Amino acid sequence: MIKFLDIDYLDDIYLLVNNYLNFIDYKYIKNELTNLDNEIIGFFVGTELVGVLSYLKILDEIEINYIVVKEEFRRNKIASELFKNIFKLKDFKVINLEVDVTNRSAIEFYLKLGFKQIRIRKNYYQGKDGLEMKKVIGEL
């Protein structure tokens, strides 16, 4: 089940996200949940939160902040389902994201979803290069 998350899920989101993205702290997630331009959607298996996707709404564009799926639930199309919810949003024409250039599996996943490689951002991830990617809604 997918649903929009609110401040009541702060601890659950933090526990999931911090296991994989330790540079995102509790305060950052709390700020996301209280910012009206930011949304976090979660994927639940039963009552367990196993995936989250955070994004920022900027005019007619969406900026993906991060996506995390619990390791033992990966390769079960959870990330795809989270993105499908984003693709259905009205009033948005473009989705942007950045990914570590060494994260080949993530890059391949985004390419399958229809994202295009835009440019390399030098030293974007604490000394590592980031790849900027973009998807125009409605394009395959």
Image: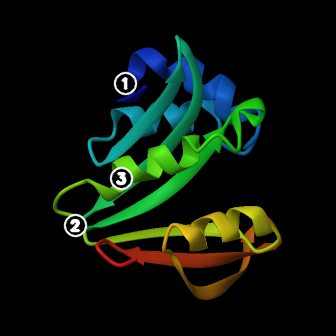
x and y, in percent, of residue 35 in the image: 33, 40
Question: Where is mark 3, residue-wise?
Answer: 86
At label 2, the amino acid type is Leu
Say whether disc 1 or disc 3 marks the residue closer to the N-terminus.
1
Describe the element under mark 3 as helix, strand or loop: helix
Describe the element under mark 1 as helix, strand or loop: loop
At label 3, the amino acid type is Ile
x and y, in percent, of residue 46 in the image: 53, 13
Say whether disc 1 or disc 2 marks the residue closer to the N-terminus.
1
x and y, in percent, of residue 126 in the image: 79, 64
Say whether disc 3 or disc 2 marks the residue closer to the N-terminus.
2
Q: How is the image coloured?
A: rainbow
The quadrant the N terminus occupies is: top left
Q: Residue furthest bottom?
A: 119
Q: Nearer the viewer, residue 93 or 111?
A: 111
Q: CA distance from mark 3 to mark 2?
A: 15 Å
Left or right: 128 with respect to 64?
right
54 up-or-down from 11: above or below: below
Left or right: 64 with respect to 18?
left
Q: CA distance from mark 1 to mark 3?
A: 17 Å
* Residue at image location 24% in from the left, 54% down from the top: 89
23 up-or-down from 121: above or below: above
Q: CA distance from mark 1 to mark 2?
A: 22 Å
Q: Nearer the viewer, residue 61 or 23?
A: 61
Q: Residue furthest top?
A: 47
Question: Where is mark 2, residue-wise?
Answer: 59
Question: Where is mark 1, residue-wise?
Answer: 6
Question: Mark 1: few, some, or many residues within 10 Å (few <14, many ≥20)?
Answer: some
